Amino acid sequence: MNAADARQMIRSEKGIELFSKLYGKDSLEFQTERYDHVIDGFTETYPRDEDFLLFSSPGRTEISGNHTDHNHGKVIGGSINLDCIAAAAVNDSNCIHILSETFQQKFTVDLNEIEPGPKHAGTAELLKGILKGFRENGYRTGGFDAYITSNVISSAGVSSSAAFETLICQILNTMFNSGTMEKTEYAQIGKYAENKYWNKGSGLLDQMCCAVGGLITIDFKNPAEPSVKKINFDFAGAAHSLIIVQTGKGHADLTEDYSSIPDEMRSVAGFFKKEFLADISEQDVLDHLNEIRQVTGDRAVMRSFHFFEENRRVDAEVEALEKGDFNTFLKNITESGNSSWKYLQNCYTTREPEEQGISIFLALTELFLARKQCGACRVHGGGFAGVIMALIPNELVDEYIFYMDRYTGKGNAYRMFIRPLGSICINGEIC
C-alpha cells in the first residue's frame, strides 16, 4: 500500500466506520489528519519504502483491582481512545529503524544484538526485550522501518509504554508471523521486556488491556495463562464519562514505593510459606493476625486486606455491569478508591508527606460529587503521584473540569472513553 492508497483507505466507508469505533464520530477529521501526518512522516523518513501498513495500539485505564495483578489477583480495565499509531514496512535487513516523533527519538536496533544493555533504560532496550521475547516463544522477527506518534499521555497512568510495546508486538505479528500470535501473548512479552530489560517489576495489567481491548476483567490466578473475559457493557450508554486528572507529578522517583507494595503483600503470603496472596485467604491472615504483624509489620497486613477485598469488589463490579446495575458499580468504585487510600496507602509517599497531590485532587472531587450526589472517583494506576480517575455524568463533565481547573490549574483533566479494540493493523480491520 502506498501513500495515496493509505489516504483513500482511511477515508473509505469502512475506514470511517473503524475510526468512529476507535476515536468517536466527533474526532474523525482530527484523526484522519493525524494519520495523514504519520503517512507523510513515514514517506519522508523512508522514501524507498513504497509499501507500508498502518497500526494502532491504545493506552489503558484501570477501572478496579488496584495493585492486585502482581499477587495474582483480579482486575477490571479497558483500552481507551488515546493511542500509539505507526506506519511501518518490512525493510529486508537485519535492522529495525524507528523514528518516534512524540518522544523525539530516532534509533536503530540490530537483530543480532538484542541482549540487555548496561543502563536498563530507554525505548531501544524495550524493543530489544520484545524481540528477545518473540524468539524465546518461537516466533519470527525481522527488520522493519517505522514512523510512530502517540497521544497516550506520558506519566499519566494510562500506560504509554505498554501502548508502545503492544504496537511493536502487533507489527511483528502482522509482518513476520501472519497474525498467528494471540493478543494475550503480547502482554506476556511486554511484561518480559520490562522485567528483564528495564528491571521494572511490572505485572500484566497494562499490556493486557492495551493488547486485548474493550472493557475486560482479568484473573491472574494462573499468570502464565490469565483468564481474560470481555465484559458485555456499553459504557457510552451509561451516560458517564471517564475523566483522568493529572495531579502534577510523575512517577520517575517512586520505584521504591511501587516495589514496596508487592514485596509487603508477598511477605504476608511468605508467613504461610506461599509466594503470592492469591494462594492464601483473608481468613488465614485473620487467624494468625498478631503473629503476622510481628513478622511483616502492620502496613503489610493492611495491604493484604486491600488485596482480598479488592478481589471481591472486582467480582461484584463485573456482576453489576453484566446486570446493567451501574449504580452498584459506582458504589464499588468508590469503595475501591477508599481502600486504596486507607489500606493500600498509595495516595502519597511517606518519604514526602508534605506533598499529597493525589489526596488533594481526590478530596476536591469527592466534595464535588457529594454536592451533586453522583459519580465516583479513585486513585488511578500505581499511585503515590500521577493521576486520579473520576466517573462523571455527561451533563456535569464541563462543570467538573471547570471546577478542577479553578482550584488546580488549567489543562489537568482529560475526557476519555473505552474503545472496543486493542492492538490492531488498520489495514487488516478495513480491508
Image: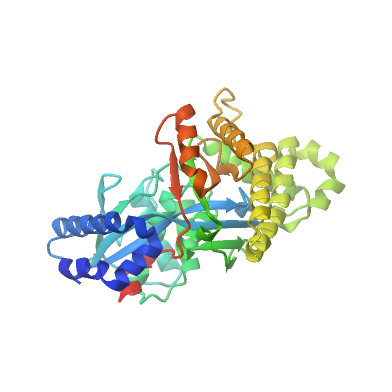
- Structure colour scheme: rainbow
Residue 268, x across and y down, in percent? 74, 46
Residue 207, x across and y down, in percent? 48, 58
Residue 279 horizontal side relative to residue 396, left or right = right
In this view, the residue in front, 338 or 363, is 363
In this view, the residue in front, 223 or 322, is 322
Res 131 visible: no
Residue 182, x across and y down, in percent? 47, 72
Q: Residue furthest top?
A: 354
Identified at 50% across, 47% down, the residue is: 395
Residue 152 horizontal side relative to residue 306, left or right = left
Residue 250, x across and y down, in percent? 45, 36
Q: Quadrant of residue 1?
A: bottom left
Identified at 55% across, 54% down, the residue is: 203
Q: Residue furthest front?
A: 395
Res 146 visible: yes
Q: Quadrant of residue 374?
A: top right
